Amino acid sequence: MRLLATIGALAIVFGIGIAVFFFGGYYSVAGTAEDPAVVTWALTKVRVASINRHATDNPPASFGDNNMVQAGAKAYASNGCANCHGAPGVMWLKYSEGLHPDPPDLKKVAGDLSPSQVFWIIKNGINMTGMPSFELAGAKDDEIWSIAAFVKKLPMVSEADYKSWTASAEPKQ
Ligand code: HEC
């Protein structure tokens, strides 16, 4: 009995301690706060597992053909992806270096993601990071598939191609 009472008392003290830490303002929400390695590890594991489980839509038959990739490049430019992720011959905007976690260079990660995973990420965004949901921002599925096709092709897209494919792109309002 005494042991159980001690465990119960400790649990209450621990609970109060956690509440004071978070609700008393001791936890820092600063974007500059370094995450402990275990938090970064856990967040990455959770993100990858969640995307693996949720990304189940199959790409359309035309996925990856030239027209789709070029339309995707234009949609990538007009949706503002390059502001955060950069593009061939286009530097990301400086402010994106202040995001935490920071946006990856997509041509380096495109090979690790399947077409449906890229589609799912663009459509839904990644909660509590700077990665927006483009469905919430008004993009339709076929536009999102075209962007995904372009992202998968990114490692092979030259600066000249990107420039000509996006020459008439206007930022979305
Ligand atoms: C405001 C900045 C911002 C914009 C605009 C943005 N992203 Fe992101 N994106 C991020 C951030 C930050 C992450 C990293 C999230 C994380 O680490 O979990 C990310 C992650 C991603 C990933 C996952 C990378 C990986 O390693 O799993 C993909 C794919 C992606 N973005 C594609 C796009 C595309 C395509 C667009 C445009 C339609 C876009 N993003 C627009 C900030 C942005």
Image (spheres, rainbow, N blue to C red):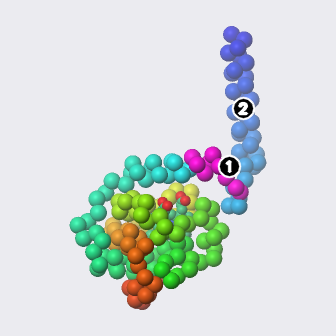
Q: Which callout, 2 or 1, points at the residue further toward the start of the chain? A: 2
Corner quadrant of residue 117: bottom left
* Image depth: mark 2 or mark 1 in front: 1
Give, as a three-letter code, the residue at label 2: Phe
Q: Is residue 140 above or below residue 51?
A: below
Q: Which residue is mark 2?
A: 14
- Answer left or right for 134 relative to 70: right
- Image point 37% across, 54% down: which residue? 55
The residue indicated by pointer 1 is: 36
Q: Where does residue 12 sit, x and y in percent of width and height?
A: 71, 28
SS state under label 2: helix
Ligand 1 contact, mark 2 (Cβ < 8 Å):
no
Q: Is residue 34 above or below residue 108?
A: above
Membership of 138 in magenta stretch: no
Residue interval drawn in magenta: 33-42
| Position in image of residue 114 (x %, y %) | 37, 60
